[in-house]
Amino acid sequence: MSEDLAAGSSGYTQIRVRKFSYRWTISNFSFCMEGFLGKNFKSPTFSPGANDKQKWCMIVYLNGIDEESRGYLSVFVGLLSSPKSPVWAKIQFGIINAKGEEFRIKNSQRVVRFNQNESWDIPKFILRDFLFSTPYFFLLDDKLTLCCEVSMVQDCMSISEQNTQPGIDIPRCTLVDDLGELWEKSSLTDCCLVVDGQEFRAHKAILAARSPVFRAMFEHDMEESRKNRIEIHDLEPEVFKAMMGFIYTGKEPDLHSMADAVLAAADMYGLERLKVMCERALCRDLSLDNAAHTLFLADLHSAVQLKTQAMDFITARASEVFQTSSWKTVVDSYPHLVNEVCVSLASAHCPFLGPSLKRLKRS
């Protein structure tokens, strides 16, 4: 090999992958409860694009495809036709739950070769008993929604060094850092916020852009707008600083030991994303002792996701939660929440949940 060739000749191959997804909803799915071995449904055909001649379909077997998979839903995706074959692709299956989230995601792990009229399957996709024992989670309005994502190899292209332009590195965007520095250093401020006697300098434009509550203060002829001075009540300085750090940077603050207080502040100032961050932190800390209080907080601040998680936790461990002091407080002061928990318990069919969940863990 020559020295010139060894010194610097290079190139690369680019493999382009096209992804597309499909959702398939089957209504009145409970009528399939008595599905027998080999019974199946086929989806409408679908394509990667509106005018694409490549056609795919999904198939679901209601009680497995053979004796080994009896008791499971089996799912297939098949290539019906394609101008070019074979087609190389990775496949991913999932179920859309009642919250609109993908659940029970399974994939092919490897690239699958499809010729026309060939399919790929997961025989043991999900236990029928588990699916039907939790209809409130998977079968909202008695509908089953399956989703399929296909990652398909489009083409590959090899490019030599002679065909490439010199690389140009674009610097990292520092917008978040720059805005955070404005807050930390109180640079070019035009308003003052007073919290428990402490003064904090800030920028009206940033506050108005990030919070509808601050925007209303500054856009209307209010005393705060005229004096450029705002008294912040019912917030501790540390909670206020956590909220302001989020307003300027969008980053999640350190919520350790004060997620409940920051949740109240986020709700007060219309910071929906910060609310969800607090919901997640409180969900992580759910326990027998605080579940009832967390349910109350979620209800008070209209934290929908947190309320759902707290309600599910209490429903699953009701006998233990009902012994806690925080639950007694809920019983004494918030009868509407007691009623909601009773409704959740009644609809959950608790005696049937335990065996189904154990069977799922063994699969």
Image: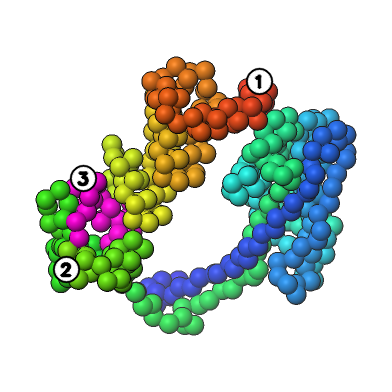
- Dividing the image into 4 quarters, which one contains the N terminus? bottom left
Q: Is residue 53 above or below residue 78?
A: below
User: Which residue position holds label 3?
Assistant: 236
Q: Would residue 24 appear left or right of 289 to someone viewing this image?
A: right
Upstream in sequence: badge 2 or badge 3: 2
Q: Position of residue 8 (x, y in %)?
A: 39, 74
Instruction: Tell me the tag on residue 351.
Output: 1
Residue 150: which quarter of the image? bottom right
Which residues fall within the magenta stretch?
230-252
Tag 1, which secondary structure?
helix
Q: Position of residue 74 (x, y in %)?
A: 77, 40
Q: Is there a contact, CB below 8 Å, between mark 3 and mark 1? A: no
Q: Amino acid at mark 1?
A: Pro
In the picture of the structure, the residue carrying the numbered disc 2 is: 227
Describe residue 66's horizontal placement relative to residue 20 as left or right: right
The tag earlier along the polypeptide, 3 or 1, is 3
State the quadrant of the C terminus: top right
